[in-house]
Amino acid sequence: QVQLVESGGGLVQPGGSLRLSCGISQDIFSRHAFMGWYRQAPGKERELVASITSGGSTPYADSVKGRFTISRDTLTNTLYLQMNRLKPEDTGVYYCNVQYRGSVYWGQGAQVTVSW
């Protein structure tokens, strides 16, 4: 059974850091897969913030460029999102996403709240 299991969300003050992790099933953890992190802020649509394309590039949304870093560990089948210099507008539920062989998979979501 394909699984994406997220961890690492929480409450952090502005300027702080968090790292999100997403454990991904072996059968879809492929260098040919698209892997990404989306977020959904309250009252807004889900948006793509960072991704690793099947070609290996790592595009970022303008709002997080220079602050967030996406990476993956092929030994542990884990996707990461390192988030630095967090802002209140980064608050939302973050979802990991894998697209592979015509199918789309989602993690369960991790709440990130940036507030004093």
Image (cartoon, rainbow, N blue to C red):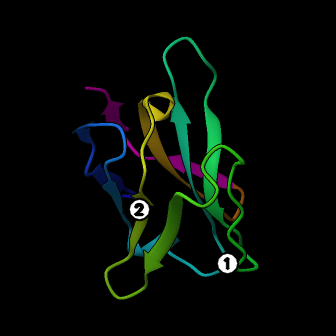
Rendered view: 24 above or below 76: above
Rendered view: 37 above or below 30: above
The circle drawn on residue 32 is 1
| Residue at horizontal 43 percent and vertical 67 percent from the top | 79
Residue 51 colored magenta?
no
Find the magenta span and give its range. 103-116
Where the C terminus falls, by quadrant?
Answer: top left
Q: Nearer the viewer, residue 71 or 17?
A: 17
The image position of residue 82, as x and y in percent, is: 41, 62
Q: Which image quadrant is residue 65 in?
A: bottom right
**Amino acid identity at mark 1:** His
| Residue at horizontal 53 percent and vertical 57 percent from the top | 67
The circle drawn on residue 82 is 2
In front of the other: label 2 or label 1? 2
**Prevailing secondary structure of the magenta residues:** strand
The image position of residue 77, as x and y in percent, is: 38, 76
